[in-house]
Amino acid sequence: MRFGTPRALIPALFCAAALSQTPSAKPPLTLDDFFNSVDIPNVRMAPDGHAVVIETTRADWAGNRFQSDLWLYREDQSGAGSLLQLTQSGHDTKPEFSPDGRSIAFLSDRGTPASESEKTAQLYVISVSGGEPFPVTQGEEEVHAFAWSADSRQIYFATHQWTKEQQEAYKKDWKDVIEFRESERGDAIYHIEIPEAQACLTESPFKTCDLSTRAKQLASTPWRAKQLATSPDGKRIALLTDSRTQRWESLDAYGIYLIDVAGGEPRKLLQREAMLDVLHWSPDSRHIFFSFLNGSVEGKYQDAQGRVYWVGAPANAQNDATAAALARWAPQFQGSITGFSVLPSGGLIAEGRLGTEVQLYNSEKPSSDFAMRPGSPGTYDKLSTAAHSSRLAFVHSSLQEPTEVWLADDPNDLLHARPITSFNHLFTEHALPEGKPYRWTTDDGVTAEGMLIYPPGQFGAKNLKMLTLIHGGPPDADGNQFGADWYSWAGMAASQGWLVFQPNYRGSIGYGDKFTLGIITKIVSRPGRDILEGVDALVKDGIADPDRLTVGGYSYGGYLTNWLITQTTRFKAAVTGAGAVENVMNWGNDDTTFDDAYFLGGLPWKTKQNYDDEASIWQIDKVKTPTHIVAGAEDIRVYVGEAYLLERALHTQGVPSKLLIFPGEGHSLDKNPWHGKIKVREELKWLEMAVH
């Protein structure tokens, strides 16, 4: 169910002038402006704190694709900083500094010198001084994870453990037939010397370099490698595993293992009833910090809020690690930890969501409470610390502050952090919506909260046409943050005159574990009531016009939208995407079946009534709301057949409806930027027609 998409720095004088304009003097956002935003998926600090490598994603409209490039912010000896584009292929992601800070490794599907047509992600290295990157790996199998050695001379990487001969034999037998489970296989972990790779590429120009012959296998695993991390002392590699196909079908695949750099069988360090997500070594190499996506580290599986733990790491990976000490950091924190990094002191600094704000918190030992670092209102994200400096970099935004990368000299001095990018300065030239939290009381006495996003120049106005825009997840939340894409389009709707209500219904994070877990077995009916009661409160308070109410959402927000239109006819229109209307076939096609069954109390044949009770298809005859539907043709997170089923049911009953299918797209609509732009364009048209 979880849904979870270049410019040099603009002179400071220009930015100051733009910010000094009064809102009324600025033009409203257009659809074209909105979809020319720049996303920032990754930020990494250099070990010495004097450089930052940044990954950006933007639309390539002519190429019908998204392009990903790397940028380098670097300070000279005088302390003056500059931002330069490091790569320009449009295919470069997941950068990591070498421990000596001289090189950056990254993944790219740009192809290799041996075969420019290859589109599998391979490993490249580029000097921080610039120049052309060179490949470190090549082949038909993509690199899943990589890590630098502590001395920066080699790189460890993971890819499927299948030789070229095995691949050819398999293709000969099976042609294009897919053996659904039998063809699945785990990963092998290799290492390659960087000088070896460079030497291979500079040998005689009359012969082709075969990098695969230079890489040496270190270990293997029956699972997929999600992350590799080398201990600071250079003696061990931590391996975080995932299921071979990344389907969430059981918990067996998820664990932390240790590998000696000399090689050998990975030894299990930790496995719990959880899908582990990110890990970092402590500076003294004695512990491994980690977080998780779903499940529980301390007991039976449950989808509570994000937390960070650490586990003791034996000095030798071959030692018995099964009794390693485990501790939760900041156990009294009531919010959700959405990201974290490790300070040079060995302490934890984390992005913590409480309500509608995501601020930075730190703690110097596991049992200590979190201390919030004084900072700017809004949302901190993509946090990265320096190994040998107090500096840290992060992405920050708020409703009226577009997403940019910031640099702070110290976690205790966030108020003096400075922006080092202006990728989204275009938005400062336009009138942006304002917003505020809104609270209401549910039928069972629980206080719920959401965000109200007002049209520019109408903050605090009454009797407005309103779109209730529902976030996915469900373990997610809306808040004081900037969003500009096909999923986070509240700002675009507000710029078109809509009051946007973003409810953080039961199941959302940032309000305590009990609130997050309050939807078990009632996956749409309980949060659905929360949302409708919020709409009622806004009408009662005179904020929303009861005759101009609309609703929409994507992914789990689509589930809820589909349910809500079976419960009320108050909405004049609905826009729904990638949302199920029944639960059995969706469980069978979903790649996150484990948490689907958890939310519904068990497997379909064991808790049939729950699956039926929470399925909108059995109440679809009540729907009168004109409904716009979208889906990716290759979506398996929420089976695309659900969209066809909903459209057919509405069409059969004569309810006005429209279905858009985006070819080649999965759940995230990340293949062609035109698809997301057309989605929002048509959804806005659908809503506007309903209230005029």
Image (cartoon, grey):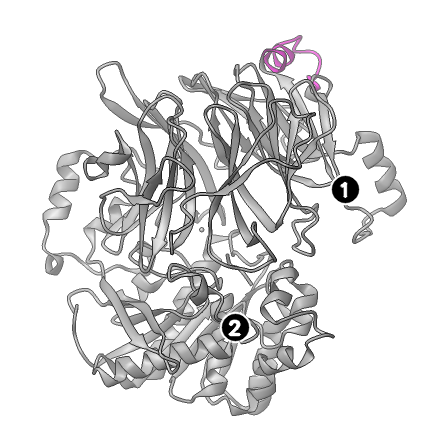
The spot of residue 533 in percent (x, y) is 36, 81
Rounded to the nearest angstrom, the CA distance separating label 2 from label 1 is 33 Å
Instruction: Tell me which corner region of the image, top left, top right, bottom left or bottom right, holds residue 415.
Output: top left
Query: In front: 222, or 490?
Result: 222
Q: Which residue is mark 2?
A: 559
Determine whether 45 is above or below 650 in the image.
above
> Mark 2: few, some, or many residues within 10 Å (few <14, many ≥20)?
many
Amino acid type indicated by mark 2:
Tyr
The spot of residue 392 in percent (x, y) is 33, 32
- SS at circle 1: loop
The spot of residue 385 in percent (x, y) is 37, 31
Instruction: Judge whether residue 687 is colored magenta.
Output: no
User: Which residue is painted at 69% across and 56% down in the image?
Assistant: 249
Query: In front: 295, or 449?
Result: 295
The spot of residue 51 in percent (x, y) is 34, 24
In the displayed structure image, the side of residue 525 where residue 52 appears, left or right: left
Query: In front: 584, or 681?
Result: 584
Instruction: Judge whether residue 199 is colored magenta.
Output: yes
Residue with the most extreme right position:
173
User: Which residue is painted at 53% across and 14% down in the image?
Assistant: 151
The residues colored magenta run: 195-210
Q: Which residue is mark 1?
A: 185
- SS at circle 2: helix
Mark seen at residue 513:
none
Q: Quadrant of the C terminus?
A: bottom left
